[in-house]
Amino acid sequence: MLLFQATLPDFCNRVEGGFLVQALSTGSVIAEVLAADEDSFLKEWVDDARLLKHNTAMAPEPELRLQCANFLASFRKGVQSGVVGKASDPQWDDLRGLLADVSKSRALQGFTAIEIAAFVFSFKKPLYHRLRQAEKDPLVLASQIWETTELLDSFGLYATELWLDTREAIIRRQQEEMLELSTPVIKLWHNILALPLIGTLDSARTQVVMESLLGAIVETNSRVAILDITGVPTVDTVVAQHLLKTVTAARLMGAECIISGIRPQIAQTIVHLGINLLDITTKATLRDAFALALERTGQSIRSEEAPVN
Amino acid sequence: MAVISSETIPVTSEPDIVFVRRRVRETAAQIGLSLVDQTKVVTAASELARNTLIYGGGGAMQLESLNGPRLGVRLTFSDNGPGIPDIQLALRDGFTTGSGLGLGLGGTKRLVNEFAIESKVGQGTKIIITRWK
Ligand SMILES: Nc1ncnc2c1ncn2[C@@H]1O[C@H](COP(=O)(O)OP(=O)(O)OP(=O)(O)O)[C@@H](O)[C@H]1O
Ligand SMILES: [Mg+2]
């Protein structure tokens, strides 16, 4: 019997009342019921899928209809071999590819993970409805439904995972965009640059900051760069080390750095940590740092009008 | 002494360190630590979290707020990494086996009220710090 099964994968065998009964494999049965009334199946499914209550951001109907039609076509192609199998089997390559596209586009449109899974699961109702009509033997029907449920459930999970991947990719991209947004080097005055640092100075970001500052020093031929850390919530040893390295590198390029915006609580913490900033020019405020920068570059700003006494 | 609240936060990546700092800051603010003391304990947490990640190969932080007789925050960092062979040496300013300034452990000790360290070579490290209101 095992041999029989191996050589004839299109058929599943079962023993009933001592007799070997040959039944059509679940895959073949599904292929048949789907072929019988593809149009009404699709209509029924689309109507169901449209009513899914979770769908806060329902896809526009033509799009939904197209996605359902493509899903159905790929599903039919998958069962053509007669074997339902597992979601990772090669006969499901097409459907997996399709689900990847659907999940991705829906994730971008703002669908939730539940909505993506519910879309896949909604395929069960019209399908099982037809299987029930086609199969009278409850045992056979139960095993057909179980086999199909396992498959569709793993497609649902697969679609959810792809949704998650897409969302994570979006978050990563936004993080990268913020990374660039948050490191503007400002040309404050002739020969003077300013770099207002805001937020967490982790290693990746500090690297970007340092490179853009050094690049700007070369580009603008600046002699003084002000690093303002008013917006940096924590200065620990790693942040301090990054600042020290930046200052040293700038110095090697002939520019002096001034660190400004060291708030009282940060100053105390730096002292307790034992970080030595004595070699570095520091100022409490950006305004003080700017005044010093003007002085160092031999410039001054004065009012056109004579001061009123 | 009563533990008012307790939560455990994984320390297995750089973003985890950012989250550790945020939760410690929120908890420290909740029990009413001054801005200076908040900054101190957050900075200490940042140092220990980074050591846990870099040297300990990752681990976790337990964050507790305490009551009695005073309010306070207690942080317990643990990892199952290589351990610290010579704790006195590791605490010394400027000592590093990596590429840091070697100020993290010594600095942390100066930033908090209580500092306890347990480490077994080949088994891991556990550091407990407390900052009282
Ligand atoms: N959790 C740990 N597991 C194993 N070794 C550790 C651990 N924490 C610290 N160490 C050891 O102790 C040394 C000193 O740590 P410390 O935090 O003082 O300095 P650092 O991390 O090297 O540099 P910095 O903290 O200034 O950036 C480390 O270089 C490391 O060898
Ligand atoms: Mg350290």
Image (cartoon, coloured by chain):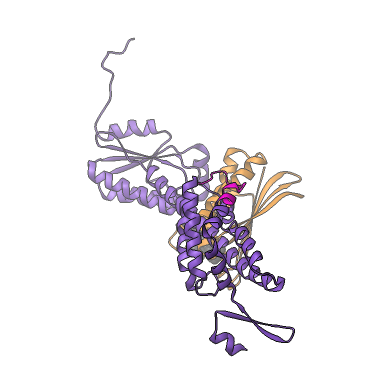
Chain colours: A purple, B orange
- The residue depicted at 50 percent of the width and 75 percent of the height is A81
Q: Is residue A240 magenta?
A: no
Quadrant in which the N terminus of chain A is drawn: bottom right
Residue B25 placement (x, y as % from top left)? 59, 44
Residue A285 to residue A10: above or below:
above
- The residue depicted at 45 percent of the width and 63 percent of the height is A97
**Residue B93 showing in the rendered view:** no
Looking at this view, name the residue that lies furthest to the front: A36
Tell me if B127 is positioned left or right of B89 in this view.
right
- The residue depicted at 33 percent of the width and 33 percent of the height is A292
Q: Looking at this view, is A190 or A51 the one in front?
A: A51
Q: Looking at this view, is B17 or B107 the one in front?
A: B17
- The residue depicted at 32 percent of the width and 50 percent of the height is A211
Magenta span of residues: A47-59
Which secondary structure dominates the residues rendered in magenta? loop
Tell me if A85 is positioned left or right of A218 in this view.
right
Tell me if A210 is positioned left or right of A90 in this view.
left
Residue A190 placement (x, y as % from top left)? 24, 34
Residue A143 placement (x, y as % from top left)? 66, 72
